[in-house]
Image (cartoon, rainbow, N blue to C red):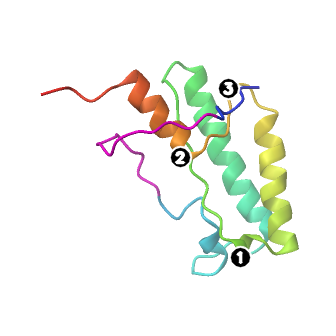
Amino acid sequence: MTRAPTATTGLAPTRFPCAATTDVQHAVRCLIPPTYATPRHFFASLKLSLDYMLEELGHGYGARLMSVGVHARWSGQPGRASALKDFIDYALQQKNVSFLRRIDIAGFWAENFPPAMA
């Protein structure tokens, strides 16, 4: 299992490539139609998404970034929290999966794809 870096960097504001996110992997789907009928549906959606991205990786399509949005009020309820916990436990058992903070993702991009100097 890959561990997330713990050091933070003092990056100057600059432009970074970013991944577009949607509400598909977001806890808000528990509230707005079409909703997840149960916390198991949220877990199933997350698991299917991760499995698909890992399958693509296995075919040589390169690294993937999966963003999961959660909100303390919606996902913090015991039933919903258990679905998130189950997903995290599942993801940690997979090869080539790591959890990163936003600052770690920004640091990766800054180190590997520095902005062109004018």
Magenta highlight on residue 12: yes
Q: Nearer the viewer, mark 2 or mark 3?
A: 2
- C-alpha distance separating marks 3 and 1: 29 Å
Mark 3 residue element: loop
Determine the residue located farthest toward the front in the rendered image: 10
Disc 2 residue type (three-letter): Arg
**Numbered circle sitting on residue 74:** 1
Mark positioned earlier in the residue sequence (1 or 2): 1
Disc 1 residue type (three-letter): Trp
Q: Residue 2 vs residue 118: left or right?
A: right
Mark positioned earlier in the residue sequence (3 or 1): 1
Magenta highlight on residue 60: no
Which residue carries the number 3 mark? 96
Disc 3 residue type (three-letter): Asn
Which residue is at the front of the view, 62 or 67? 67
Vertically, is 16 above or below 2? below
Residue 38 at what x, y percent from top left?
A: 78, 72
Q: Nearer the viewer, mark 1 or mark 2?
A: 2
**Numbered circle sitting on residue 102:** 2
Q: Quadrant of the N terminus?
A: top right
Q: Residue 111 vs residue 99: left or right?
A: left
Which portion, as a residue range, is magenta? 7-21
